[in-house]
Image (spheres, helix red, strand yellow):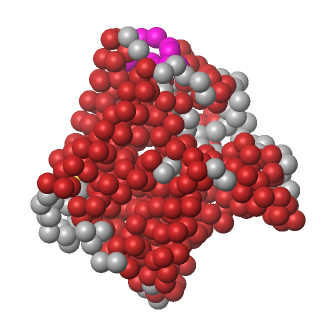
Amino acid sequence: MDLAGLGALGLVALEWLALGWLSGAAWPGQPTLANWALRLLLGAVLVSLAQVGLALVGVGFSGPGVVVVLAVAAAGAGALRLFGGGACSERDKQVPIARGERVGWLLLGGVLAAASLRSLLVPEAGWDAYSHWGLRAQAYALAGGVVDAHSEHEYYPPLVPLLEAWLYVHRGLVSIDLAKTVWALVGSAFGVCLAWQLRLSLRRAWLAPYLATGILVATPALLESFWTGQADLALTAWLSLAALAAFQWRRAPRRAWLVQAAVFGAAAALTKFEGAPRIGVVVVALMVDAALARRRVGLVPALVLALAAGGGWLAWTLVELGHGIAPNAEHLGAFQPLAIGGILLALLAVFGGLRTGGGLLVAVLAWLVSGGALLRGWLRPLTLVVLGQAAATLVAFMLSATAPDVEVRTSATRLVEQWLPLALFVGALGLSERYP
């Protein structure tokens, strides 16, 4: 990357941070670094939502359009501040960061820095980044708005190519090697937010950065997305943070958690073809938990997530129709339940190695040791979410338009990546409950 590209990346990051700051988003206590990580992610989503909203009325995002996008995003940030700004909850007293925990934060920072540095230095090698996301981002940047790029899977939601095109506009030229560096920012901020979510939930708060580091390392496909430019990192971040915000609301009902759930739920629906169904699984899991707990109020986060994801999906559908992009479901075929045996064998082959299957093995062992703690009380909502995501992944393989075992071999690692951090998160909390 040249210095101008690095400068453009820094400028984009500053815009996102400013928008996030304007939204008033903050974690409980005074976690300065984690607050800025959350604000960066919220700012990125606000920019993409503004781009999609302006595309509905035919306004682009190049030249003077940059100012218009930032103005609309700033208005959205102001609305978030009015509705649910400030700390998500004062339920937890601020726990001072001990010396041992500082070492953990340094360890987490080292892993994130190494992955980000590789993103800056290693040339793009992901086929999808060229054939789909990269070509769409190039077309969007050159046209200054959403167009039909005639790429693979053109009907896919546009958040990933829109944010990459946003970086191109700031740089003044198109470079796929530059575009993927955006996801190092998103991935690093997600890692910090994941650690702080653990810190809010664990009995021993000082373990949070160590466990977050373990989750990242145990999900190699997630770390690889820092430098391959794939969209799965973004979907993993939005899906995880939306589900965790809904989970935290169940523990301490504050509007700020609902704001996070709505923003990240909409982002997930605008990221990949499977984003809206993934959020739909979270909605169903929350509804089941509310029914089991016999608490109607538990339906509130489910309703918020459903409306946000549905709104994102509807907005993109309208943009598609307005630009002559034909929505379709080419990946979906007839339901093949009898293929379950071949699917399970193919999954065993894909995740049989330590590198690809180590994280799944750790999650399974943690769940087994945690036992009934996962299905009782406050952990049940997240447990149902993870079980639902695993079941939905199997169903997706049985609905594949290609041979299910072939689909497993080509996409299992990235589909599991999307919910594996949540599975490891739940395992960590379960062990914390079992061995306080």
Please state, as top left, top right, bottom left or bottom right, where the C terminus lies in the image.
bottom left
Please state the total of marks drawn on the protein image.
0
Q: Position of residue 41 (x, y in %)?
A: 35, 43
Magenta residues? 167-178
> What residue is drawn where x is 87% and y is 65%?
338
- The answer to whether residue 203 shows anywhere in this view is yes
Q: Residue furthest front?
A: 354
Q: Is residue 52 visible?
A: no
User: Which of 349 and 56 lies nearest the eye of the viewer?
Assistant: 349
Q: Residue at x 14, y 69 (%)?
A: 93
Q: Residue at x 57, y 46 (%)?
A: 355
Left or right: residue 183 compared with residue 80: right
In the image, residue 240 sits, relative to residue 43, either above or below, namely below
Quarter residue 64 falls in: top left
Q: Residue at x 36, y 54 (%)?
A: 212
Q: Quadrant of residue 158?
A: top right
